[in-house]
Image: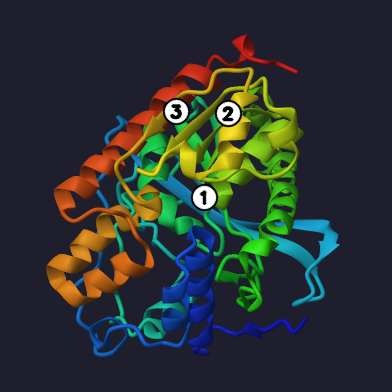
């Protein structure tokens, strides 16, 4: 295996093909993979810049302003083959803030990641200057409901879950979002090094990815006191994830007693949890294809002994990410670009109103689930 690290400012156009390939493989897009990997997307998408300004997200609806802190967590028990140092996870902590006035707005991506991503997609600088509706390093409220960990889809940056994360933070939760080195298409390290996804990713790597991700979750759980101080010990902890992140959330819920409840956003089931089931609450959201298209997930549902609310949305797979509003926004700026994004990251959404409505439904499901099952988790499957 050959690993590649790149310093900020070095353009690595090849990583986009790997990122696109991973996303397509995850959702079974088949023939279009070769086209995307070969860089033969529409000229307006990967050619001349066409986006007139940054993409945007609906503001959160909770009562509190949102703050965010960025950092890294190291796992000294695992050595990263790319750096020769401890495996290090980029994380962000999102939380209800006491106030956010006069604070620096929190960026959607780190500057180093954005500098690689935009030119690699031939997008103008500033396309991902997305307003996260969060302030960097704002003071955290003393009273918080609990902690929710967030894991992204296979190969994808966790930033694509920001629309959901900020909603929960505005309603009193602390969220710790994490990316997974060598799987997320590019991650930054503390010294500024960028690690790109391994180039040989395929659906067959998913089980190994889940195992690696579950260990990453354990690293975060083990360092919550470092992130939040002594208050962390008394807080209930849950998790949600999209696609393989949802798969990871279910498996981690089985493995770690510290986790009390989780939500799987359109992920298939893998690992021990399929055989053993769960006593703890597991919420499930699926796309328009339903459980019938995911036999292992249907099997897992049959073995859930705890509460397991299920909701189906009339969206495609990436309708559970920020693409649900980004794609129709891009379409308004340039129809060809919007069509390429929709073909690559399918949401099943054709208008911005529909995308906003879908995001709102996902926000409601997560908010209601966490308020009901994580806040009152002592009633459900305490171990």
Residue 122: x, y in percent?
33, 85
How many numbered marks appear?
Answer: 3
Whether label 3 touches label 2, CB < 8 Å: yes
Whether label 1 touches label 3, CB < 8 Å: no
**Which one is in front in this view, the residue at disc 2 or the one at disc 1?**
2
Q: Nearer the viewer, residue 36 or 148?
A: 36
Residue 91: x, y in percent?
58, 55
What colour-coding does the image apply? rainbow
| CA–CA distance in space, label 1 to label 3 | 15 Å
Q: Earlier in the sequence, mark 1 or mark 3?
A: 1
Residue 125, by quadrant, is bottom left
Q: Nearer the viewer, residue 144 or 364?
A: 364
Q: Nearer the viewer, residue 255 or 76?
A: 255
* Residue at horizontal 72 percent and vertical 32 percent from the top: 254
Binning the other alpha carbons within 10 Å of mark 1 as few (below 14), some (14 to 19) or many (20 upward) gives: many
Mark 1 sits on what residue? 243
Mark 3 sits on what residue? 310
* Residue at horizontal 66 percent and vertical 69 percent from the top: 182
Mark 2 sits on what residue? 301
Q: Nearer the viewer, residue 298 or 252?
A: 298
| CA–CA distance in space, label 3 to label 2 | 9 Å
Binning the other alpha carbons within 10 Å of mark 3 as few (below 14), some (14 to 19) or many (20 upward) gives: some
- Look at the image and tell me in which quarter the N terminus lies: bottom right
Query: In what element is the residue under mark 1?
Result: loop
Q: Earlier in the sequence, mark 3 or mark 2?
A: 2
Q: Is residue 93 above or below residue 30?
A: above
């Amino acid at each position: 295996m050959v690993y590649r690290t790149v310093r900020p400012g070095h353009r690595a156009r090849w990583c986009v093909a790997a990122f696109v390939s991973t996303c397509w493989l995850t959702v079974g897009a088949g023939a279009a993979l070769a086209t995307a990997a070969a860089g033969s997307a529409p000229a307006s998408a990967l050619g001349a810049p066409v986006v007139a300004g940054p993409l945007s997200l609906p503001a959160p609806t909770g009562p509190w302003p949102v703050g965010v802190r960025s950092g890294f967590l190291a796992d000294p028990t695992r050595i990263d083959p790319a750096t020769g140092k401890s495996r290090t996870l980029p994380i962000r902590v999102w939380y209800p803030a006491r106030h956010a006035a006069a604070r620096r707005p929190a960026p959607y991506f780190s500057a180093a990641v954005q500098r690689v991503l935009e030119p690699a997609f031939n997008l103008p600088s500033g396309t991902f200057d997305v307003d996260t509706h969060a302030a960097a390093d704002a003071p955290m409220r003393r009273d918080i409901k609990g902690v929710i960990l967030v894991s992204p889809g296979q190969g994808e940056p966790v930033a694509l879950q920001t629309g959901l994360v900020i909603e929960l933070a505005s309603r009193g939760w602390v969220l710790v979002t994490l990316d997974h080195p060598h799987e997320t298409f590019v991650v930054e390290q503390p010294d500024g090094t960028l690690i790109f996804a391994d180039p040989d990713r395929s659906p067959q790597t998913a089980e190994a990815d889940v195992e690696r991700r579950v260990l990453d979750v354990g690293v975060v759980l083990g360092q919550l006191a470092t992130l939040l101080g002594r208050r962390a010990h008394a807080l209930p902890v849950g998790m949600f994830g999209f696609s393989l992140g949802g798969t990871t959330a279910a498996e981690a819920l089985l493995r770690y007693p510290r986790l009390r409840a989780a939500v799987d956003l359109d992920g298939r089931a893998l690992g021990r949890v399929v055989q053993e089931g769960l006593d703890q609450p597991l919420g499930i959201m699926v796309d328009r294809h339903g459980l019938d298209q995911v036999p292992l997930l249907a099997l897992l549902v049959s073995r859930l002994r705890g509460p397991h609310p299920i909701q189906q949305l009339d969206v495609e797979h990436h309708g559970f990410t920020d693409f649900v509003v980004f794609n129709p926004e891009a379409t308004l700026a340039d129809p060809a670009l919007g069509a390429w994004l929709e073909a690559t990251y399918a949401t099943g959404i054709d208008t911005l109103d529909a995308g906003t409505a879908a995001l709102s439904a996902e926000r409601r499901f997560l908010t209601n689930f966490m308020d009901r099952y994580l806040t009152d988790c002592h009633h459900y499957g305490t171990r």
